[in-house]
Image: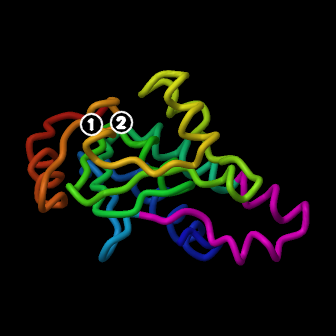
Amino acid sequence: MLSTETLNALAITLDRLKTSPSVRSVIFTGTADAFASGADINELASLNTSQAHEFSQRGQRITNTIANLSQVTIAAINGFCMGGGLDFALACDIRIASRSALFAHPGSKLGIITGWGGTQRLPRLIGKSKAIELFSTARRFSSDEALKAGLVTQIADPVLEAAIAIADKSTSTF
């Protein structure tokens, strides 16, 4: 889950990467059966209005940093890719999914909507109508559907090995 602690650690790592000219590509992946399951809902429920606003801003800064890195960014999506986790994947240049990957923006079931850039990036990739459907229904969609819609560029197992192969072929930065 993407807790405040996780976001802080990610921000520190991204700051280091921004100033590392020898790094040509960056791969984001998860563990076990999850790429990232989104924000920690229990933590969100405990935040006051000001803290919730800052949490949203922090996530947005991080996804914008990922999107603006000079290195090639690759999301190796190994399982559940939900909510804010999907926003992080959307910020990457390339998205590769395992056959078992599942995608969703479940915020509408909780009465919230992503604040980390997904509402802008998802329609650009898959089209406005499909994005609105996914945001409003919170429906989960498979890696096959993600490939067909243009959300991911390929399905590969093991997904991390496929991402590393692309990273190894990367010869320049943006």
The residue at which mark 2 appears reads as 151
Residue 132: within the magenta?
no
**151 above or below 100?**
above
- Residue at 32% x, 42% y: name it: 71
Residue 44: within the magenta?
yes
Q: Are marks 1 and 2 in contact (CB under 8 Å)?
A: yes
- Residue at 37% x, 69% y: name it: 34
Which amino acid type corresponds to the residue marked 2 in the rendered image?
A: Leu
Residue 99 relative to residue 20: left or right: left
Circle 1 — which element?
Answer: helix
Residue 103 relative to residue 72: left or right: right
Q: Position of residue 22 (x, y in %)?
A: 24, 50
- Residue at 30% x, 43% y: name it: 95
The answer to which quarter of the image holds residue 94 is top left
Q: Position of residue 42 (x, y in %)?
A: 71, 77
Part of the protein shown in magenta: 36-57
Q: Position of residue 147 (x, y in %)?
A: 27, 37
Give the Cα distance between marks 1 and 2: 6 Å
The answer to which quarter of the image holds residue 47 is bottom right
Q: Position of residue 118 (x, y in %)?
A: 57, 40
The residue at which mark 1 appears reads as 147
Residue 18, disc: none
